[in-house]
Amino acid sequence: MTADRRLLLVHAHPDDETITTGATMARYVAEGARVTLLTCTLGEEGEVLVPELAQLAADQADQLGGYRIGELREAMAALGVTDVRFLGGAGRYRDSGMIGTPANEHPRAFWNADLDEAVAHAVAVVREVRPQVVVTYDEQGGYGHPDHIQAHRVAMAAVDAAADPGHRPDLGAAWQVAKVYWSCVPRTVLQQALDAFAAAGAASPFEGIDDADQLPFAVPDEWVAAAVDGRAWHDRKDAAMRAHATQITVDGPFFALSNNLGQPLMSVEHFRLVRGERGAPGGWPEGWEDDLFAGLRG
């Protein structure tokens, strides 16, 4: 499939899209696909890594979310993505923080959103954009953040509802998404990264863990269906990561979040196929697809 390819990515906070799928987005934009980003919150509860902007934090001026809209726009400009949306409009849903924190009890927290309402907002986007491929998180949200879990729920429910002509016809004509992927990191890829840190005498980026089997977000290699090679667009991902300056520090081939532990900046990104038919294997020795649109016809 080469013509009129449309990819929709559903992410929880600004910067999630770049960390997990930035190279993929840059590649498909460069190849002429329409790439739409749907972000569910403004990331108001993020920790601020830029000292002179510390007063924007949620426990001070509470203006970080608005600032991060600008960071997201700059990051997407670096990747070439022009269709950037917020679920229900910017600020409709608030960053929920982690379970057990006051932020998680906020009345506008995405975790507490009316699911039918949130799904309807997503259905409207699916029916307008009409993507063949949707990318989001697994049922654990990758690492368990409530907003990632909720983004998963909304995205998966929206894919089903958008295909049902009887569901909210006021939101547009029904549309069947052909393939749904969950972003992931294979166990072997994580282990290679951990081994490289150990060989360099550096601390593990995952709180001292040096065995990928102990990381809850490591997925068995056999679960992986696709790997998108975005190495030709590594510089674009690097620039997009740097645009999220309140959240991410980039140093050469590594980046760090608020824990200040380095992680490799990866430009080969992996995915599990959970809806649709797997396409022909690409050039990976593992037999993975090398194109999320593999097997689809124009």
Image (cartoon, grey):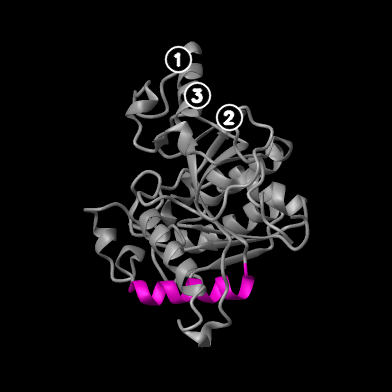
Label placed on residue 193: 3
Q: Nearer the viewer, mark 1 or mark 2?
A: 2
Q: Quadrant of residue 19?
A: top right
Span shown in magenta: 114-130
Crowding around mark 3 (Cα neighbors within 10 Å: few <14, some 14 to 19, many 20+) is some
The answer to whether marks 1 and 2 mark residues whose Cβ atoms lie closer than 8 Å is no
Q: Nearer the viewer, mark 3 or mark 1?
A: 3
Q: Which residue is mark 1?
A: 198
Crowding around mark 2 (Cα neighbors within 10 Å: few <14, some 14 to 19, many 20+) is some
Asked whether, in this view, residue 186 is left or right of residue 3, the answer is left
Helix, strand or loop under label 3 = helix
Q: Quadrant of residue 59?
A: bottom left
Q: Earlier in the sequence, mark 2 or mark 3?
A: 3
- Residue at 54% of width from left, 56% of height from top? 276
- Residue at 77% of width from left, 55% of height from top? 2
Q: Position of residue 250 (x, y in %)?
A: 57, 35
Helix, strand or loop under label 1 = helix
Q: Nearer the viewer, mark 2 or mark 3?
A: 2
Tell me, yes or no, if residue 88 can be seen here. no
Helix, strand or loop under label 2 = loop
Label placed on residue 286: 2
Q: Position of residue 177 (x, y in %)?
A: 57, 64
Q: Amino acid at mark 3?
A: Ala
- Residue at 62% of width from left, 27% of height from top? 285
Label placed on residue 274: none
Residue 150 falls inside the magenta stretch: no
- Residue at 28% of width from left, 66% of height from top? 106
